[in-house]
Image (cartoon, rainbow, N blue to C red):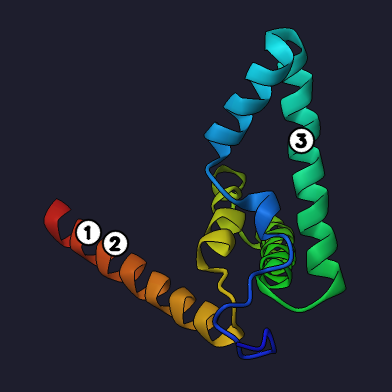
C-alpha cells in the first residue's frame, strides 16, 4: 500500500522516539550507564525527546502541533484570567481563576466555551444546593 496521506500503515515521523513506555526506556538507559551516569543520562534523553517533539510540532501539522497549540492557549488563558482576577476578585480566591481557565481549556474555542458554561452551571447549582441545605 502506498504510504500517502490517507494511508493507515503510515507511521508518525517520530514514533520510534516515543515508542514503548517511559519507565522501560528510562530503566534500559540506567542499566546501560549505571546509576550515577543514569540520572544525567535520563535527563539528557528526556530533553532530547522533548526537543524532537517540539521540533516536530513546529515543522509540520500533526498531533505534536495540536498539543503545542493547546499548551499555548492554556497558558494564555491562565495568564489572562490571573490578570482579570487581580482587578475583580479578592486576594483569597485569585488562584482559582487560572485553575478554572486551565480546567476549561479545550482544543477548540467551541469546546472551551461549552465546558466553561457547564462549569459555571455546575458551580451555581452546587452553591444553590449548599445554601439550601445550610439553611
Disc 1 is placed on an element classified as: helix
Query: Mark 1 or mark 2: which is in front?
Result: 2
Crowd class of label 2 (few under 14; some 14 to 19; many from 20; radius 10 Å): few
Side (left or right) of 85 relative to 20: right
- Where is mark 3, residue-wise? 45
Disc 3 is placed on an element classified as: helix
Q: Quadrant of the N terminus?
A: bottom right
Q: Can residue 38 be seen?
A: yes
The one of 69 and 38 positioned closer to us in this rendering: 38
Q: CA distance from mark 1 to mark 3?
A: 53 Å
- Is tag 2's residue or tag 3's residue first in the polypeptide sequence? 3
Q: Quadrant of the C terminus?
A: bottom left
Position above or below: 75 against 25? below
The quadrant holding residue 63 is bottom right
Position above or below: 132 against 110? above
Crowd class of label 1 (few under 14; some 14 to 19; many from 20; radius 10 Å): few
- Where is mark 1, residue-wise? 131
Side (left or right) of 55 relative to 74: right
Q: Which mark is residue 103?
A: none
Q: CA distance from mark 1 to mark 2?
A: 6 Å
Q: Which mark is residue 127?
A: 2
Residue 82 drawn at (x, y percent):
69, 57
Q: Residue at x 70, y 75 (%)?
A: 62
Disc 2 is placed on an element classified as: helix
The quadrant holding residue 16 is bottom right
Query: Mark 2 or mark 3: which is in front?
Result: 3
The one of 78 and 67 positioned closer to us in this rendering: 67
Crowd class of label 3 (few under 14; some 14 to 19; many from 20; radius 10 Å): some
Residue 51 drawn at (x, y percent):
83, 50
Amino acid at each position: 500500500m502506498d504510504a500517502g496521506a490517507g494511508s493507515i500503515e503510515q507511521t508518525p515521523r517520530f514514533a520510534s522516539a516515543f515508542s514503548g513506555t517511559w519507565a522501560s526506556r528510562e530503566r534500559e538507559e540506567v542499566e546501560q550507564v549505571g546509576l550515577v551516569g543514569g540520572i544525567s543520562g535520563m535527563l539528557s534523553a528526556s530533553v532530547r525527546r522533548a526537543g524532537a517533539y517540539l521540533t516536530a510540532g513546529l515543522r509540520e501539522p500533526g498531533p505534536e502541533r495540536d498539543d503545542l497549540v493547546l499548551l499555548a492557549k492554556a497558558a494564555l488563558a491562565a495568564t489572562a484570567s490571573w490578570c482579570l482576577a487581580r482587578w475583580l476578585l479578592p486576594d483569597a480566591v485569585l488562584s482559582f481563576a487560572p485553575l478554572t481557565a486551565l480546567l476549561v481549556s479545550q482544543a477548540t474555542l467551541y469546546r472551551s466555551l461549552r465546558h466553561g458554561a457547564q462549569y459555571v452551571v455546575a458551580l451555581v447549582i452546587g452553591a444553590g444546593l449548599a445554601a439550601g441545605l445550610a439553611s
